[in-house]
Amino acid sequence: MEFNVWFLGIKSGGKQIIVIDNEDASQLGIHSSDRVEVTYKNKHIIAIANVAAEFPRGTLGIYSEVYDKLQAENGETVTVRPAERPESIAYIREKINGKRLRPKEIEAIIMDVVERHLSDIELASFVTSLYIHGTCIDEVEALTKAMVETGQTVDFDKGPLLDKHSIGGVPGDKTTILVIPIVAAAGFTIPKTSSRAITSPAGTADRVEVLCPVNLSCEEMQKVVKKTNACLAWGGALDLAPADDLLIQVEYPLSIDPLLLPSIMSKKKAIGADYVVVDIPTGRGAKIKTIGEAQSLAQEFIELGKRLDMKIQCAVTFGEQPIGYAIGPALEAWEALSTLMGKGPIDLVNKAASLAGLLFEMMGINDGAQKAKDIIKSGKAEKKLREIIAAQGGNPDVEPEDIETGPETIAVPSKEEGRVQWINNMAMAQIARESGAPKNRGSGVLLNKKLGDKVAEGDIIYTIFSENTQKLNSAEALAKNLNPIGVTGKFGEKMLMGTIPTKKVTLEKPFILER
Amino acid sequence: MEFNVWFLGIKSGGKQIIVIDNEDASQLGIHSSDRVEVTYKNKHIIAIANVAAEFPRGTLGIYSEVYDKLQAENGETVTVRPAERPESIAYIREKINGKRLRPKEIEAIIMDVVERHLSDIELASFVTSLYIHGTCIDEVEALTKAMVETGQTVDFDKGPLLDKHSIGGVPGDKTTILVIPIVAAAGFTIPKTSSRAITSPAGTADRVEVLCPVNLSCEEMQKVVKKTNACLAWGGALDLAPADDLLIQVEYPLSIDPLLLPSIMSKKKAIGADYVVVDIPTGRGAKIKTIGEAQSLAQEFIELGKRLDMKIQCAVTFGEQPIGYAIGPALEAWEALSTLMGKGPIDLVNKAASLAGLLFEMMGINDGAQKAKDIIKSGKAEKKLREIIAAQGGNPDVEPEDIETGPETIAVPSKEEGRVQWINNMAMAQIARESGAPKNRGSGVLLNKKLGDKVAEGDIIYTIFSENTQKLNSAEALAKNLNPIGVTGKFGEKMLMGTIPTKKVTLEKPFILER
């Protein structure tokens, strides 16, 4: 059937979408989400049809992605016909039915994901099936390889390449900003890409961006690494494993994460990592609750690493409270810089030294954690961070006090005396987000007390920072509601931990999808 | 945040959708598919955000559904804020995790389906979870009741009400056009609503529309039933169980059908049916392959009926070949009318008489099938059909030869001699669709031979009808490819039934979703 093009001026963000009237669709024999082939002159594309109930007859509404490919102007004539269903849909159906998929089938699916041949409905059904039926290690391997093959890869012309990754879930975890310069200062190459926050108060890219630009191209990243042996770049612009980014868009509204391993490991493989330390924060309030769970996840990382020619070490770290005291991009950048300058909290120093130390030991160095601490103490790690900041276009002479936080603050006092017995990670993250983080960089929470600390009645237990009064107030109100820090005297003196609200409240999405 | 409205002039077909730029979305802290509350003057609505990569900043693109509710004109200012996630998402997550849902939870989900608060991603994940984990009878009951309660119900002010339903899957099944007038001619009330074809060559509504209008409003339907004790209406315009229609839009691209029972039974309950006969065509090439499967499905229908205060009888019918000889709207209308006039195929007569007979026996009449045959023979069923045609606005004096078919035809001869050993239902349906059915009413297939018939080499085994040469030719080509009728001599003489193509071909969707 022939249609006149009408350019809608909307960019879907990748998907090739056309809009067509109900009646026209029925004449073509297609329904919403069916695929059509659109032909203009000698150009053909496959697009997904949005069937609209009242759209001008004989008109084909096209999104920017379709326009970019066809270059058909308003009013020009194109031919539309129903397209065959991609073969990969048959494989998605097999996964729905609980079958294991073979590598060829997984490749076909991932290829169609990247080429935008699958609709949100098909993608959602696929990730739901992966989540419910699970994935065996062969499938995980095939998914990872297919994600790497359908994306960009970066060659650093150096080797071996080291890398570090955290599965996330603990607020205030700025460890990466320490580990990378420590490792690079020891002469190893460690090109690090990070993500921005999706549902947490800060991702590593958000934190580093307080110090210098992170939005690097592949070439810029290669230059920075050549100069400094390291980088702290945002991975989002690099098109590494784009299938993962597309699948996350569907996983996010469902708060499910069946592709954790392929998602992480495909990005490591795409930049050519040889030795990787994976941090698995563990405990109540972390993604992984028990050491047993952490061990079985670690086994999968190690096995997958073998299949991808990467050496993996997994670190199970204490995840029951925020790392250090600061939560929020600027507060965390300030704390990370201060720590490299010798004035940091013990848990952050120890965590960074342990992870860097594991990498050192993988490279044959004894007593790695001590070597990492020595590098901090010597000032070499600080110097290396400043080199990286300079190479990425920031101010290498930045001092912690130059970093703007707040400016508005509210200090929250304890109503009881005793010791800090628990800190609710999720609640802390939500309060920091309510105050404006990560968008407002200066917003967040600064803890004054941490687990085990003695608290007198009226002592400040944490301080909320915000860039505007309204957000500050709403964060304070949320904090009252969530009561994120528990102070009691002796264990057992207070047995009632809380009451269960009769109505189920889902305040915000858990940040399971942060990488 | 404040936005200027821009009316996109697109109707989504129900969903309340707004389009917003990437950067604006990030400022608001929302992602694609998140819900937002849009406020204009004193009007508030919840809409689903489509995040576009390049959209004018500060502009809120609105679909017609949003415009209809807000009445905000181009350039006017509206306020947008992130909306809380509907509670029902927590229940969908529970189903993803394999939990049984309680009635209250199912009600919340179905309510949010109807109010369009759930995105395609959430709906797809929900139906996939229902399909994988299955539904217990309590869930099926709650789903059915919730679908009824969130839709229109029709009161016919008469009782008891009889009804008939087929789970479908066999081409050429025009039985309903016979059963309804037979039952009504016996003095019972049987207000029948039917669907149009989605993936089959003809639905009952398509067939009846050849004889008279089927697009009745509730009031028109009530009038027709008052006058004739029956109707043959299209259910699509009546808003009975709209949740079902919305869920089908998601099930269709996935070719899964986890809501078969609620879908069928909610529509029966919505029109107040008291006695229902459910036809379960069974056999190779039908939806249900074995009598055992048919029995367990029947048990579920019967149990669900009890819980809804409906008496159900299930008929397991022979489903291994088309019913009668005709496939396609006009051909089938012609065959149905001819059969009521005494010149019909034995299988169609027997099937209609059996189903009508079951209803008669439920009403206390002995030897129901014989009574049904007597009613056909007496001409009363034909007379009743003509009354219904007249009441719905058609020509009551229509003769079979008035019905236009074709006009172009190709007769397909047998290359072998022997007997017809098998007929491939799915292939027949696809050939009929390729010829133009159901859109082109006169298109379709007329069988010349059926199972067990003797065939000489060169005998015509079926004839393809089409309204245009191109479609006729492409149907013929498809027929050559699919070889839908198998003729052999003695069993065993030919053991090779076919070869399996190395590449998996999914030609078209199975018509599992036809109701």
Image (spheres, coloured by chain):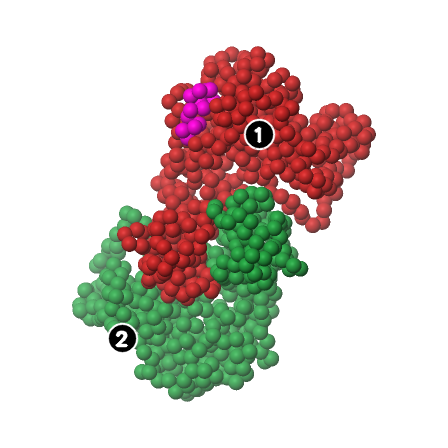
Chain colours: A red, B green
For residue A339, which quarter of the picture? top right
Q: What numbered label is drawn on residue B407?
A: 2
* Residue A432 visible in the shown view: yes
Q: Is residue B347 left or right of residue B113?
A: left
For residue A151, which quarter of the picture? top left
Between B114 and B415, the one nearer to me in the picture = B114
Between A487 and B385, the one nearer to me in the picture = A487
Q: Residue at x 35, y 77 (%)?
A: B335
* Residue B162 visible in the shown view: no
Placement of A496 over or under B303, stated as above or below: above
**Residue A90 sits inside the magenta stretch:** no
Between B113 and B96, the one nearer to me in the picture = B113
Q: Which residue is mark 1?
A: A210
Between A146 and A83, the one nearer to me in the picture = A83
Q: Chain of mark 2?
A: B
Where residue B373 appears, as percent x and y from the top left, is: 42, 81
The span picked out in magenta is A218-230
Three-letter amino acid code at the position of disc 1: Val
Q: Main secondary structure of the magenta part?
A: helix
- Classify 10 Å Cα crowding around label 2: few (below 14), some (14-19), many (20 and above): few
Where residue A62 appears, as percent x and y from the top left, is: 41, 55
Where residue B347 appears, as percent x and y from the top left, is: 36, 74
Q: Residue at x 51, y 20 (%)?
A: A387
Where residue A85 appears, as percent x and y from the top left, is: 36, 53
Circle 1: element type:
loop
Q: Is residue A504 left or right of residue B75?
A: right
**Residue A224 sits inside the magenta stretch:** yes
